Amino acid sequence: MNARNHRTLRRPVSLSGVGVHSGQEATLTFRPDPTGPGIRFRRSDLEGSPEIPADLDHVVGTELGTTLAVDEEIRVMTVEHVMAALWAQGITRVVVELDGPEPPIRDGSFRDYVTALEETGIEELEGEVPVLRLPTPVTVDGAQGSKYVATPSPDFRISATIDFEHPAIGRQYGSFHFENGSFATEIAPARTFGFEAEADRLRARGLARGTSLDNTIVLGEDGVLNEGLRFRDEFLRHKVGDMVGDLGLLGAKLETHIVAERPSHQGNVRLARTLATEARRNPMGDPIVDIQKILQYLPHRFPMLLVDRVVDFERGKRIVGVKNVTINEPFFQGHYPGHPIMPGVLIIEAMAQVGGLLLMDTIDDPEDKVVYFMSLDKVKWRRPVTPGDQLVFELELVQLRRTVCKMKGMGYVDGTLVAEAQFLARIMDR
């Protein structure tokens, strides 16, 4: 994802084919969505055409592919090829409409999706894509011997190793730097692969029912049954493409170098969740809004100003703010002596103040306005907040109608959820 700004498509584009696991024919249509919240899959074959957000919160399966769902009936299988293609083109706002349970596998690679998105045209939008940076290296142990190390980097690259006890694969290593459109040439043509000896067992379990020599590299006992490979290390390159697709569920531009040993979908998703946690644990970079600007926008003053800085911001969409909790907070004198705990109502108040800053950027003359909160819903406190903690609040604008809005907020300490709430608020003249 080289683009800094959000992107969508100029017009819809469709591709049809069979699902690699379900064996069902389906048509997938990418639809422009310039004002939407992000990438969503829409099951047009189900009643009401329900949507599934393409994010880590909706991952429900990682066996031989990544599955997203909102419940048992509303799900979509094997999303990684689609997600990798969207990432490669920097597309962050789109509806992926599907009239079946699984995207078409096409020729088994990412190439058809990348080409279709490129040819249909891409539209630049206002607002920058969130950037995920790491302050220190992160290590993640995946399943079946997979291991990942993510280190700080000025850009995104993957170095990966795979190891299969098969003469056509063996141990393969490669390093790929994803800038200047290299995904389309170095990764996109690489096809998925499977072993002939496992085919019957997988099909008996409802998997691999759409596989054929036209869409899968099939490995027999002594070698490849297809006519030939597109790359000497095509197996490795496909695994790297799957990593890109799974990491695309973060919805962020990555600035990290990932070293992966035997990557898998389960390990990829575990890595993505760890990266998201680390990003919340250590907000990086210079503040987008510092305390001086906060004082201009919010009417609160000591001891009720509970926001120190804003570290991420998307106009009219979301905001990330920070409150550093110190032992000098006046409320610790009485809550409680000898056992200081930040009052839950003040945690929610701090969250609401961050939300107020998001709203102020949606209106004219914010210095003449004030935000009054009208109601709270679904308030939960998960764990105590104590001196030395850094509260990181993420708020999303769910709905805005004239001067009344609805927001959803989450509060984290060291990447762990400590509080959540939904707000209804009104913007008023001072």
Image: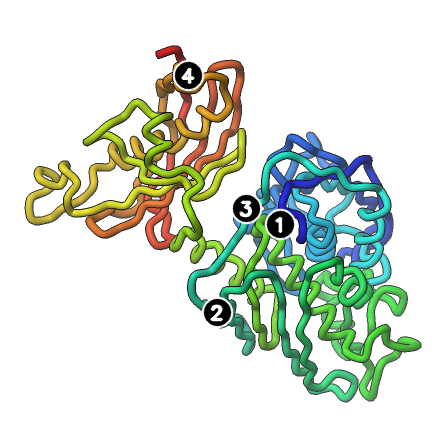
Q: Which residue is mark 2?
A: 140
Are there few (<14), some (14-19), or many (20+) residues within 10 Å of tag 2? Answer: some
* Of callouts 4 and 3, the N-terminal one: 3
Q: Nearer the viewer, mark 3 or mark 2?
A: 3
Q: Nearer the viewer, mark 1 or mark 3?
A: 3
Question: Residue 130: which numbered mark, if any?
Answer: 3
Amino acid type of the residue that numbered disc 4 sits on in the rendered structure: Arg
Say which of 24 and 158 sits in front: 158
Q: CA distance from mark 4 to mark 2?
A: 44 Å
SS category of the residue bearing label 1: strand
Q: Is residue 45 visible?
A: no
Q: Which residue is mark 4?
A: 426
- Percent coordinates x, y for residue 237 in the rendering: 73, 71
Question: Residue 394: which numbered mark, if any?
Answer: none
Q: CA distance from mark 4 to mark 3?
A: 27 Å
Q: Which residue is mark 1?
A: 68
* Of callouts 2 and 1, the N-terminal one: 1
